[in-house]
Image (spheres, rainbow, N blue to C red):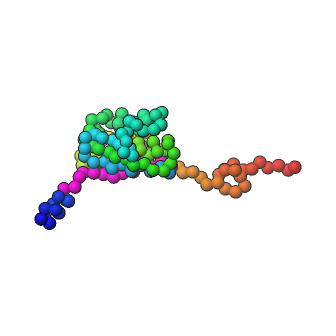
Amino acid sequence: DAAVMAETKKKSVDCVQVFGRKKTAIALAYCKRGKGLIKVNGQPIEYVKPEGLRDKVLEPIYLLGYPRFEGVDIRIRVTGGGYTAQIYAIRQAIAKSIVAFNQKYVDEATKTEIKDILMSFDRSLLVADPRRCEPKKFGGRSARARFQKSYR
């Protein structure tokens, strides 16, 4: 009985876990074999708010074509940041998860092909943007601006 239990545990699902980042927003993507579902915080990707930036989230899917996503389910949890940063984190998580999944469970050639398509379109789909908000300093109202100087 214990041997059967151990065997069922070994037959684990093919899955990869990756994350996308933008400023302080972090999107964690869990990508496994499935039938083409992509959900963000439990909702289908078509309902991502705001609508103006919805195309940004769908960019990796437009670029690679839907057939590449038909064999996988991607679930994304996103926290932190603002609306726009979250959108950019989600699209990066989707792109990175499909690359990682292909590398691990398909083959290197497919992975390289996908990576080249994404990279030639937009590098931020796979590489995180290191820019962060600079802290405010004394003697001024922001990180760089100083108070106006007057002699009277």
Give the quadrant of residue 92. top left
Relative placement, left or right, of 7 versus 130 is left
Say whether residue 29 is left or right of residue 131.
Answer: left
Residue occupying the point 34% across, 46% down: 75
Relative to residue 4, is residue 90 depicted above or below? above
Span colored in magenta:
11-23
Query: In the image, is 88 to the left or to the right of 100?
Result: right
Residue at 35%, 36% (x, y): give it.
Answer: 61
Give coordinates of residue 59: x percent, y percent.
39, 36
Q: Is residue 8 magenta?
A: no
Say which of 21 and 52 sits in front. Answer: 52
Residue occupying the far right of the picture? 152
Q: Nearer the viewer, residue 99 or 108?
A: 99
Residue 147 visible? The answer is yes
User: If the image is split into quadrants, where does the N terminus sit?
Assistant: bottom left
Residue 136, percent across and down? 64, 54
